[in-house]
Image: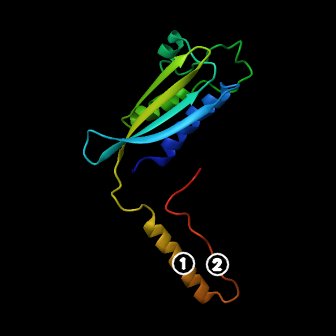
Amino acid sequence: MIGDELRIKQILNNLLSNAIKYTDEGDINLSLTAKQSEKENMQVLCIKVRDTGQGLTTHQVENLFADEFVRFNLKTNREIQGSGLGLSITSKLVDMMDGDISVESVKGEGSTFTVNLPQKLGGSGVLGEEEVARLEDLETIQTAFMNITRVEHEPMPYGKVW
């Protein structure tokens, strides 16, 4: 898939940091899947963040993305740092990428945030082959011209892990 790596990282960061902040015990689950899009040459990246944290009431869910500044349960959560802008920013980013965001939550049991982002297909070839070939050429050139030291590296296999 070809998409906006920086914005997708920002969306993931906002969703995961909220899950961590509001989950005192239990677990947090991140799921990334892809499904076929109705549009040609597109797929939908599906991001789900599920936590067993505080959860939200129906009223809170309805107002979660409505305001610029949203913080609930201020007495209970006064020690939790943050501006309350993360989900508003996330919602705007998702909207700008022609995606959608939703939340299912039960007070006291946790929440599941789901983001669907349409992404262009990158083709059937392995992404990053050109970069690996360039790095391998760099190693050969540097080895040939630098008798004092030899530059060796092992390129990542066509991807990144953050």
Residue 33 lies in quadrant: top left
Disc 2 is placed on an element classified as loop
Characterize the local packing of mark 1: few (<14), some (14-19) or many (20 or more) Cα atoms within 10 angstroms. Answer: some
Question: Which residue has dot 2 on it?
Answer: 151
Return the disc, 2 or 1, that comes first in the chain's sequence.
Answer: 1
The disc placed on residue 64 is: none
Disc 2 + disc 1, Cβ < 8 Å: yes
Is residue 86 visible in the rendered image? The answer is no
- Give the distance between the C-alpha atoms of the residues marked 2 and 1, in whole angstroms: 9 Å
Characterize the local packing of mark 2: few (<14), some (14-19) or many (20 or more) Cα atoms within 10 angstroms. Answer: few
Q: Horizontally, is 33 left or right of 60 in the view? A: left
- Determine whether 15 is above or below 32 in the image: above
**Residue 55 x/y as whole percent:** 59, 18
- Determine whether 37 is above or below 149 in the image: above
**Residue 3 x/y as whole percent:** 41, 47
Question: Which residue has dot 1 on it?
Answer: 138
Disc 1 is placed on an element classified as helix
**Residue 120 x/y as whole percent:** 34, 48
| Residue situated in front as seen by the camera: 38 or 141 | 38
- Specify the amino acid type for callout 1: Leu
